[in-house]
Image (spheres, helix red, strand yellow):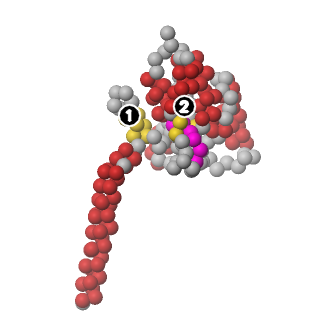
Amino acid sequence: MSQLNKAVRSTLALWLLTAFLYPFFMLLCGQIALPFQANGSLITNSQGTVVGSALIGQPFSSDRYFWSRPSTVKYSTDPEVAKTGISGASNLAPSNPELLKRIQVEVARLKQANIQPTADLVYTSGSGLDPHISIAAAQAQVRRIASARNLNLAQIQTLVSQNIDGRFLGIFGEPGVNVLRLNLALDALQPKS
């Protein structure tokens, strides 16, 4: 009976520790040390309305905005996809006709918009939710946006330069541009006179 009593007490103590105390402690640490990240890295517009997360990309199709890279899951904005909240790549082989057709469509769309195709404007990311594009992909879109918004090229070039996210800890990954943040900064620009 004493063994059973010890087992029950140990189980309750561990349950209290792992189910309540530790999660509460981690939640508290996150809210104190990194509140922006702990709450989903949410980005707000100039009116204070949440428009997205810095961690999850969004589709942009207007000529007035920088375009994100293609997504096989449509950035979970499709109602059918959003129900499950999936992420991932298409897993199509390089020789798959469906993949080749999708790439040809993307390249044609970019060329029609007078944008030099870059890898990240043609190929999807592994998660399908990548919020960043390369600096080259952002630069390739500058002329189209300047024309659509009646802005000076130098204004947009400066904006791209100001919104570059460097390597993590200075060594991991490649520099890139968060498309949502860049488009919000773009909305704040005034047209040339």
Name the residue at 32% across, 64% down. Answer: 22
Name the residue at 61% across, 29% down. Answer: 139
Q: Position of residue 75 (x, y in %)?
A: 51, 40
Q: Which residues are magenta?
A: 173-179
- Residue in the foreground of this view, choosing between 5 and 157: 157
Quadrant in the rendering for residue 166: top right
Disc 1 designates what residue? 44
Disc 2 designates what residue? 161
* In magenta stretch: residue 24: no
Query: Quick one: SS at disc 1?
Result: strand
Residue type for callout 2: Ser
Quadrant in the rendering for residue 110: top right
- Residue in the foreground of this view, choosing between 106 and 30: 30
Q: Quadrant of the N terminus?
A: bottom left
Tell me: residue 88, above or below residue 43.
below
Confirm whether residue 180 shows in the render.
yes
Q: Are marks 2 and 1 in contact (CB under 8 Å)?
A: no
* In magenta stretch: residue 176: yes
Q: Position of residue 53 (x, y in %)?
A: 43, 40
Front of the two marks 2 and 1: 2
Mark 2 or 1, nearer chain start: 1
Tell me: residue 45, above or below residue 129.
above
Q: Position of residue 115 (x, y in %)?
A: 66, 26
* Labelled disc at residue 21: none
Tell me: residue 62, above or below residue 93.
above
Name the residue at 45% across, 45% down. Answer: 83
